[in-house]
Amino acid sequence: MANRNSRKYPDNGNELITRLYGYSVSGSKWELLLKYFQDAFPMIVYCLVYLIFFHALEKGVPGSYHVIHIDIDDHIPFLEIFIIPYLGWFFYVGYHAVKMYIHDRKEYHRLCTMLVIGMSVFILVSAVWPNRLLLRPVAMPRNNIFTDMVKELYVADTPTNVFPSIHVFNTLAVITAVWSSDSAYARKPFMHYGTLIFGILIILSTMFLKQHSAIDVTCAFLMWYLCRVLVYQHHFCFIRNNAEKESA
């Protein structure tokens, strides 16, 4: 019987770097580690800058807000159970970004390009066209652990600058990346369809929790479609490694 420990692993990470970038590099383990994670740095820096602008907009007090509302919003019920997928969105986006980084670097770059475009448009719109919602219930219709969680969400997240919905846009970007990836992790039926189903629940949660108007959601879909055309049909991408540049 073959020894289970006889499987060949790269001793210094050079083989992994070669597979990802298409060329061999030499150096210490720290240099190789830095090389492996270099593609993550631009997105990390962008997220930090995005959070700074986001919190500045949240703390700012513009002269007036544009109230976002459409008739269908009044017919959408408040369902506190949807706090679970709504909060799960943070893990959902982060998890798939990390998995794409590990298993499909090309798809990771596409995903990040879509996220950067969508989040940047959101910041720009919020800065030049401050907006808010007046949809939240004055009092909770029920008293349970989920309504308590929604109360905490309402305290932490103001109903301002909600257009278009980044919850919805980023969810659609993740679904697109998973369904476009040829990696083994994304092709697993549980992951493939689970990402879609949980993504649909996240999108619905934005309206059932009165965090977004149907207008926010509709415009997020429109923005996602335009970004998808730009990234997947016209092959626009902010970052590419050497192997991707050669195949482009």
Image (cartoon, rainbow, N blue to C red):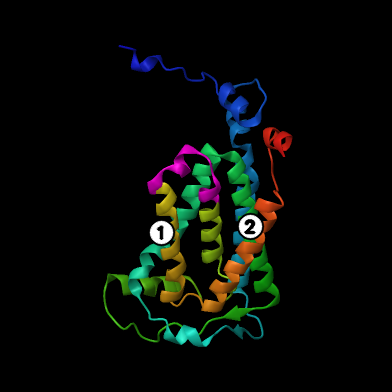
Q: Secondary structure at mark 2?
A: helix
Q: In the visual, does 117 lie left or right of 151? A: right
At which x and y percent is residue 172? 53, 60
> Within 10 Å of the Cα at label 2, are there few (<14), some (14-19), or many (20+) other Cα atoms?
many
Q: Which of these two is toward me, 36 or 51?
A: 36
- Residue ID for mark 1: 197
Q: Is residue 80 left or right of residue 111?
A: left
Q: Is residue 104 magenta?
A: no
> At label 2, which amino acid type do we have?
Arg
Where residue 64 appears, x then y in whole percent?
Answer: 64, 86
Work out how far the residue at label 2 is from the one at label 1, CA to CA, in angstroms.
20 Å
Residue 27 as seen in the image, left or right of residue 82: right
* Mark nearer the N terminus (2 vs 1): 1
Q: Main secondary structure of the magenta part?
A: helix
> Residue 89: horizontal and vertical position, in percent?
45, 59
Residue drawn at the location 41% of the way across and 52% of the way down: 193
Q: Amino acid at mark 1?
A: Ile
In this figure, which residue is indicated by the disc labeled 2?
Answer: 228
